[in-house]
Image (cartoon, grey):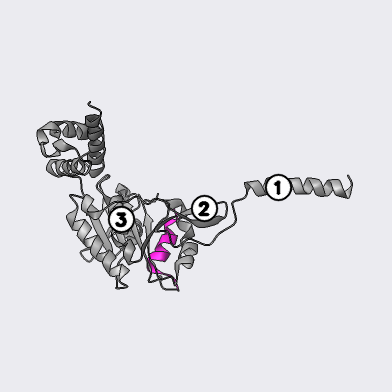
Amino acid sequence: MDLQQFLQQAAALLQRVEALLPPPATAPDFSALAHRWRREGSRGWLEPVAHPHAVRLADLSGIDRQKELLAQNTRQFVRALPANNALLWGARGTGKSSLIKALLTEYAGEGLRLIEVEKQHLVDLPDLVQQLMGREERFLIFCDDLSFEADDASYKALKVVLDGSLAAPPENLLIYATSNRRHLLPEYQGDNQQAKVIEGELHPGEAIEEKVALSDRFGLWLSFYPFSQEQYLAIVRLWLERLGVASAADEESWRLEALRWAQGRGVRSGRSAWQFARDYAGRLACGG
């Protein structure tokens, strides 16, 4: 093989390799209201969300206390006042994620920005934080449906950002996480067997201390519980009205159907209420 053939084959090989590589890093577009942290290979970057989910605080019913507390914490944050990282935990479909999204709608005009980071990418938090430090915007890192297995060490990166290491956490950043677990890690019966009584006081075992340690780093805990029947029906009524269903005020026309819908799914939640309202409104419009 002469030199010219070697160079041609090398160039062709490089083209095939380059096609498999991620695109070159570009500067984040901080004019966008929301981003997702993406990773491909060894590189991570902020991807703008073209059409963020526009949820309004007024659309969320049955969680007035949680809404008030988180909105107050967020107002403090966007106004550069002391505020806490927040853990929203509890029953599925009760509005935890929607509440965080609604905060972006409410406070984007005051400089709030939302960045969604998936659990498997938490190891990239130090790199992400480095890109956000010193900026004027106020960033919420949104970790949805967060939980860790017993042997999952990726939560250590989250610990560092929550509490800081040698460097203090950036003042323009908070973490809002949702989870079905209060302590983010699975709890087993055997954990309680490690507890000891010392001079009449009960001291939890190391396993329990480790599991509580992470959630303790969130300064604000908000609990979400399954809705009562009346709360569920009130949310159905709200969504039917939002969807312009003329008979929304006439509960007898949809009440029984809404209860059957929830029974079929085994849960009364804001999510199931929204799904039923869409189904009912669509069938009504089609004459069904």
Report the side of 254 relative to 15 (left or right). Answer: left
Q: Is residue 106 visible?
A: yes
Quarter of the image holding residue 101? bottom left
- How far apart marks 1 and 3 lie (CA) works out to 44 Å
Q: Which mark is residue 27?
A: none
Q: Earlier in the sequence, mark 3 or mark 2?
A: 2
- Judging by the rendered image, the residue that carries numbered circle 3 is 100
Quarter of the image holding residue 132? bottom left
The residue shown at (26%, 53%) is 56
Crowding at dot 1, Cα within 10 Å, few <14 / some 14-19 / many 20+, comes out as few
- The image shows residue 18, relative to residue 163, as above or below, that is above
Circles 3 and 2 in contact, beta carbons < 8 Å: no
Say which of 263 and 71 sits in front: 71
Secondary structure state at the residue bearing disc 1: helix
Q: Is residue 44 magenta?
A: no
- How far apart marks 2 and 1 lie (CA) works out to 22 Å
Q: Is residue 156 magenta?
A: yes
Say which of 226 and 66 sits in front: 66
Crowding at dot 3, Cα within 10 Å, few <14 / some 14-19 / many 20+, comes out as many
- Judging by the rendered image, the residue that carries numbered circle 2 is 39
Q: How many marks?
A: 3
Report the side of 16 relative to 278 (left or right). Answer: right
In the image, which residues are magenta? 152-166
- How far apart marks 3 and 2 lie (CA) works out to 23 Å
Q: Earlier in the sequence, mark 1 or mark 3?
A: 1
Of marks 2 and 1, the one in the foreground: 1
Single out the residue that lies furthest toward the right.
2
Circles 1 and 3 in contact, beta carbons < 8 Å: no
Residue 42 picture location, percent across and down: 57, 55
Residue 31 picture location, percent across and down: 43, 62
